[in-house]
Amino acid sequence: MELLSNLASPIVIGILMGGLYVVIALGLSLVFGVMKVINVAHGDLVIFGSYMAYAALTTLGLNPLWWILPSLPLFFILGYLIEKYLLNRAAKISPDAALIIAFGLALIVQNASQIIWTPQTRSLITDFTMTTFKVGRVYIPLVYVLDFVAALVVMVVVRQFLQRTYLGQAITAASQDRQTAELMGINPSRVYQVAFGIAMALASIAGIFYGLTFSFYPSSGPALLIIAFGVIILGGLGSMVGTFIGGMIFGLSQTLGGYFFGPTGQLLVPFLMVLLVLTIRPQGLFGR
Amino acid sequence: MRKYSLLGTLIVITVLAALLPVIGAPKTWLLYLFYFYVFLAAANMWNLLAGFSGLLALCPAAFIGLGGYTMTILTWWGIQYYIGIIVGGVVAALFAMLISMSVFRMKGVYFAIGTLVLPAILKLVFLRWKPVGGDFEGGGAGYMVKGVRAIPPEVTYWLALGIGLASMVLILIILRSKFGLGLAAIRDNDISAASSGINVFGLKLSSFIIAALVMGVVGGIFYMNNGYIEPNNAFDINWLMIVLLATVIGGKGLEWGPLFGTVIVVALRFQLARYAGISLLIQGLILVVIMLVAPQGIVGLIRDLRKKFMNQQNKKLPSSS
């Protein structure tokens, strides 16, 4: 009984934090599902999203949650252009070329952030950053709840978009079978550009909520990338529901690992799980 | 004939490079060259994996870090550094063997992701594990390499030169052997290679282990010169960046690619050392531009230009006659 009540806190926090990981991983999952490219710049783009929110907060005094609205079109356009002028050309050269271009992009974004905002640690501090409330014996910070709500909203919106709109269906079709989609009159280049634009917008949202929850610095990106990979691998590449459950599993194993094995267990346990899943079931727990 | 001239050039350059510390070359030159040799060896091995064996292994930091840690820990047990460097290579190779049971079940993207996670796991392990030393060493605090002051700087330089040369010779030998032919067949089409009797799994595994061995030795030499090792540096993604940049800028899958690429990476690193951010930013830009303009890197570009030039010459010949 004592153990159970002690475990309540890591379990609740783990699930809520899993929501944040879901948002971070969704953009990566979408790009892989549609374009079959591992966008290794994703983590750095997420942190770039945090920095843009930080810039809006410090220069305009804009609340990060309001910054979501203007950042979505901004990042969408940015992603659209990156796909159109960089990745699209790379994909024609070889599959490895796209990966290497993404590496170059990661270097550029990371170091541009470092030059503009210095290597100092930053965080998005607002009036609700320190707010916590108590449920039973568990103290829950408000930002963690926001992370989880954001995950649910983003999941539902992206799912509805993919299922209900023409463009969304085209993206789904192109991800399932590119050649058949082309025969059905879908322009794959345009689909890829839109998909990458959406992934960038998702990176921006992820960056905003990451910045609200944790402090960040220019080289936080690669660690986030590995976490996002972990989430996707646990859930299965390209599966949306899988990504959601993967995020929960990752968050839970992180907090429970921390509870049982101390601070280094926090990431060690989920990473070992990722390696185990990759070995036994490479397509992920929910992948087909 | 051509074979001998190549061998001769290599020997002459090596002898000249080896004499540099004796004739009193400036210390900064020796430092640049040290980095050049070490990065060259790592990049050559990554080229063997990603360029020739079709293994997009994103884990050079795992091998290099393990080699460095093994060498460092052994000096704490009073074992000489040169033995430690070799043992470091062996440990990295054993780790590659062990981990291949897991990662070699993955294909393509999954292999890349699986190998990317390895250095992250090792970093966490070494942040926690304290094999030697007291409360103030190990873990996040890292270890000093014991007795590093007693090692003359020219010995460190020669060791680096040795591993750089060895990696180059190894690549040249591998590519001219049956092993290299098998790898080329796999790279072009692994299914048809398998059907013509090539042991695809065996060859890939061998090049994975060879690369791990050399990278482990590289790690030992690098951290011996560094005098200090800690997990966040040893298992950093930076190692991947260095080998990837050097290989791709020079020409991935071309035997002389890493040589040219490493020159550029080291030059940029030191020319812009004061502005670390800008240096990496420029390297990122070069990476993107090279990939779009000349996917085969500088060596590929030179080769294509030469071919073009030769073709023009050939066209001119019949018209003039």
Image: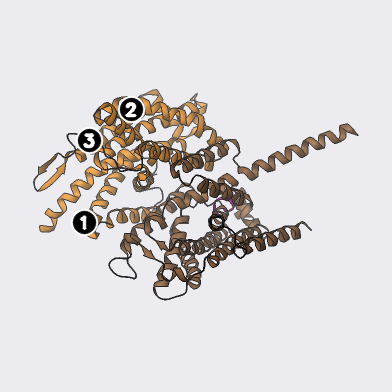
Residue that mark 1 sits on: A259
- The chain ID associated with circle 2 is A
Asked whether, in this view, residue A137 is left or right of residue A266, the answer is left
Q: Is residue B188 magenta?
A: no
Disc 3 vs disc 2: which is toward the camera? 2
- Identified by mark 1, the residue type is Tyr
* Quadrant hosting residue A78: top left
Q: Is residue A246 above or below residue A78?
A: below
Q: Which residue is drawn at 44% across and 40% down?
A: A106
Q: Residues within 10 Å of mark 1 (few under 14, many from 20)?
A: some
Q: Are marks 3 and 1 in contact (CB under 8 Å)?
A: no
Question: Most extreme residue toward the bottom, as rendered?
Answer: B78
Q: In the rendered image, which residue does mark 2 sit on?
A: A71
Secondary structure beneath disc 2? helix
Which quarter of the rendering shows the C terminus of chain A? Answer: top left
Q: The orange chain is which one?
A: A
Q: Position of residue B183 (x, y in %)?
A: 61, 55
- Subunit of mark 1? A
The residue sitting at 47% across, 31% down in the picture is A83
User: Residue B313, position in %: x, y?
Assistant: 80, 37
x, y percent for residue B245: 52, 46
Q: From mark 3 to mark 1, how far is it between C-alphas?
A: 25 Å
Q: Which mark is residue A227?
A: none
- Residue segment shown in magenta: B49-59
Regarding residue B251, the answer to whether it shows in the image is: no
- Rendered shade, chain B: brown
Q: What type is the residue that disc 2 sits on?
A: Ser
Discs 2 and 1 carry the same chain letter:
yes
Q: Determine which residue is flagged by label 3.
A: A149
Mark 3 or mark 2, which has the lower sequence index? 2
Secondary structure mostly seen in magenta is loop
Task: Name the residue nearer the viewer: B273 or A221.
Answer: B273
